[in-house]
Image: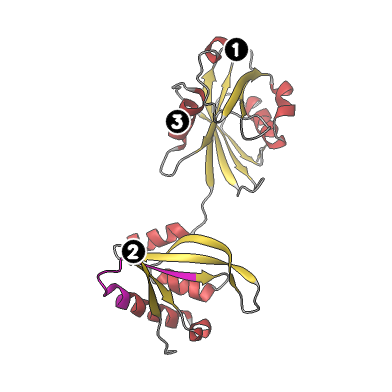
Amino acid sequence: MTAFTISFQPAGDGAARLQLPSAAATSAPDDLRSSITLAVEAAFADDQLDRLEIPVREPDNGLRWAVIRSGFRLEGRRRRAGRDDDGRPVDELIFGRLRSDVIGGADGFSAVANTITPRKRLIAHVLMRDSAGRILLCETTFKTDWELPGGIVERGESPRLGAIREIREELGVDREIGTLLAVDWMPPYLGWDDALELIFDGGSVTEDELADYQLDPREIVAVNLIELADAEPHLTPLSFRRLTAITTADPGQTLVLENGSPL
């Protein structure tokens, strides 16, 4: 085992940052883990400290493994905040550990894994149509293309409840949500990571009902009932493919899509 000491530097407000010596760069992950564990025990012996953090340059997988195995959770990324051995800018990952964190066992492992495993954005939209088959689409304040009412599902919120909440926020109405019409995987787009979108059946709507909607002026400029063919110029190609697949599917069918196209 390589012998070295990891010190900690108080950062105020009950926090401290672990400082790794240069010898740590060439150490085995198990040695790093042992040294980090000892440093954590020494730091938390100070009753005034409640939080520890440690930066990890990408792609230092050895240190990252040791930090994760020591119970630290990924809390954020500082873009181009570090330098690799050749002086080139790299991202720096910030891992943190609280005195109260559960360490070890199924709960501790899951809590750490929850911070480092990939997460996908989840979006819930609602398809509403009138008796002639026209689709309700929203003109928004933040982009040129039109879209179905709905939006991003909040953390810990079910997709169905997220769709109901978004309809209430955007259109000012409480509306029951029906069956799931489609699940679509969307590739990265305009700076967004990839995402999953769920489209629910919102039932029928009339022109008279639209007049009673209380649109959120921060997000919604107008709502329109429009034939899908006429809406194509206002939609992204992905949205047009998706809506074409949904509106031509057999009744009661739930579609599985990728990038708007049925599998």
State the mark number for residue 165: 3
Element type at marker 1? loop
Quarter occupied by residue 127: top right
Query: Relative to residue 30, is residue 215 drawn left or right?
Result: right
Q: Nearer the viewer, residue 262 or 166?
A: 166
Q: In which quadrant of the rendered image does the N terminus lie?
A: bottom left
Which contiguous range is marked in magenta?
41-55
Magenta stretch: residue 193 in it?
no
Work out whether mark 2 precedes mark 3 in sequence or the reverse, and give the earlier one: 2
Q: What residue would you read off at disc 1?
A: 131
Query: Relative to residue 86, is residue 112 drawn left or right?
Result: left
Residue 35 vertical position relative to residue 97 in the rendered view, above or below: below
Q: What residue would you read off at disc 2?
A: 13
Mark 3–mark 1 contact, CB under 8 Å? no
Residue 169 image point, x, y percent: 47, 28
As measured in the structure, the alpha-carbon distance from the residue carrying label 3 to the one carrying label 1 is: 25 Å
Work out whether mark 2 precedes mark 1 in sequence or the reverse, and give the earlier one: 2
Residue 150 vertical position relative to residue 49 in the rendered view, above or below: above
State the mark number for residue 257: none
Which numbered mark, 2 or 1, is in the foreground of this view? 2
Answer whether residue 84 is visible to the viewer in this image.
yes
